[in-house]
Amino acid sequence: MEREYFLHQIASHRILSSGFCQDSGLFQGKMGISLFFFIYARYVSNHWYEEFAGELLEDVCNGLDINIPITFVDGLCGIGWAIEFMVQSGYVEGNTDEILINIDSKVMERDLRRISDISFETGLEGIVAYVYTRLHTPRVAASSPFDADYLEELVCVCKKHKIAWTGEQYGLQSVWVKVLNSFQDISFERYDWREGLCILKQQGV
């Protein structure tokens, strides 16, 4: 009962304060908050929370600056991955090959050979997580959102840094666990939506 009350308080707090959030990212911004509300809405079977999550997602998509960094923590890879997660988890509908075409193109512009940061949050692993998820998107046509030259370069760079990028460790659910583990390393604010997501995961949602 205490847990349910705490989750409700998180939701109420975020509804009141989300209008002040200017960040669009997954780890600190509207994309992460939207994901919290989609998952919480399913947990409590409340359609109103789902509508609120949809409004936040629409705000992110309509106001997205395609020139922000491609990082996972606060940039395009995290935002794009979250959209893919929402679609594949049944929270929203849509063709992600169409929705994410601009993000895919922007990701391919990054010169992988010059990356020195290999971390998940801000470096190569975050790019790998996004690309792997996009390549394994269920699709009718056997097409790839990334060209052959880019993928070949990614394979070479991953070998250089000993990243087994074809492994299931970058599958959708594995990356979701990585995201939540990263949240747990954060000092939560009072009624922090990231703590709410960790609680919901513990509940098997």
Image: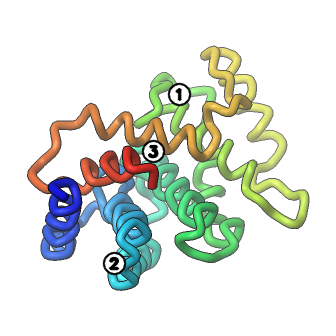
Work out which quarter of the rendered image holds the N terminus and state it: bottom left
Label 2 neighbourhood size at 10 Å, few (<14), some (14-19), many (20+)?
many
Q: Position of residue 38 (x, y in %)?
A: 41, 69
Whole-angstrom CA distance, mark 1 to mark 3, is 14 Å
Q: What's the amino acid at mark 3?
A: Phe
Q: Going 56% across and 27% down the picture, which residue do you hit?
A: 114
Residue ranking furthest to the right: 142
Q: Which mark is residue 105?
A: none
Question: Is residue 150 placed above or below 13 in the rendered structure?
Answer: above
Kindly identify which residue carries mark 1.
Answer: 115
Can residue 24 be seen?
no
Q: What's the amino acid at mark 2?
A: Tyr
Q: Secondary structure at mark 3?
A: loop
Q: Going 40% across and 83% down the picture, which residue do you hit?
A: 47
Q: Going 14% across and 75% down the picture, which residue do you hit?
A: 16
Kindly identify which residue carries mark 3.
Answer: 72
Name which of mark 1 and mark 3 comes first in the sequence.
Answer: 3
Q: Is 146 on the left or on the right of 122, as rendered?
A: right
Between 125 and 34, the residue placed more toward the observer is: 34
Whole-angstrom CA distance, mark 2 to mark 3, is 25 Å
Labels 1, 3: front one: 3
Name which of mark 2 and mark 3 comes first in the sequence.
Answer: 2
Q: Position of residue 80 (x, y in %)?
A: 54, 58
- Where residue 93 sits, quadrant-wise, is bottom right
